[in-house]
Amino acid sequence: MEETYTVDLQGLKELAHKLAENLKGNEVIFLKGDLGAGKTTFVRYLVEALQPEEGTVVRSPTFAVLNEYRTQKGNVYHADLYRVKNFDFTDYVGNGILLIEWADYLKDLKPDLVIEFKVLDENRRKVKIRTAEG
């Protein structure tokens, strides 16, 4: 399966909320796209849709490598491998939703979904969502 959307910021939020409705809670999702393409913003909207604990603030994990958020649908793990090319995800796979930015470096971990972000202009993005076998 593969679907492509052209969205503005509100459309990105709606897309994240739609995806959240269909997640089981143990998916591995790779997020691809250039710096500033909207990957972390998408995660922010996705976590929002999953009803996080009060006071949760979604931040880029660029320097922390991995951030964890507790939601009504279970844990969400948000990783960023921009600065770290190798990370052991053994403890996270199957224990929540695992979202990984810059996952191109991973050889042994297979995603359930791949979401690609492309900047069209200042306000619009092309977002392609595909299943791993798609």
Image (cartoon, grey):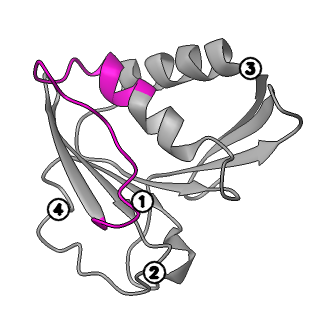
Tell me if label 1 and label 2 are in contact, CB under 8 Å: yes
Label 3 element class: loop
Using the numbered discs, state the Cα–Cα distance from disc 3 to disc 1 in whole angstroms.
22 Å
- Nearer the observer: mark 3 or 1; the answer is 3
Q: Amino acid at mark 2?
A: Leu
Name the mark on residue 92.
Answer: 4
The total of numbered circles placed on residues is: 4
The magenta stretch spans residue 46 = yes
User: Would residue 101 appear left or right of 123 to someone viewing this image?
Assistant: left
Name the mark on residue 8.
Answer: 3
Name the mark on residue 106.
Answer: 2
Which of the two discs, 4 and 1, labels the residue nearer the N terminus?
A: 4
Q: Amino acid at mark 1?
A: Ile
The spot of residue 89 in percent (x, y) is 23, 72
Residue at (56, 13) in percent of width and height: 14
Residue at (40, 82) in percent of width and height: 84
Q: Residues within 10 Å of mark 2 (few under 14, many from 20)?
A: some
The spot of residue 52 in percent (x, y) is 18, 23
Which of the two discs, 1 and 2, labels the residue nearer the N terminus?
A: 1
Using the numbered discs, state the Cα–Cα distance from disc 3 to disc 4 in whole angstroms.
31 Å
- Nearer the observer: mark 2 or 3; the answer is 3
Residue at (55, 45) in percent of width and height: 39
Q: Amino acid at mark 3?
A: Asp
- Splitting the image into 4 quarters, where does residue 50 fall? top left
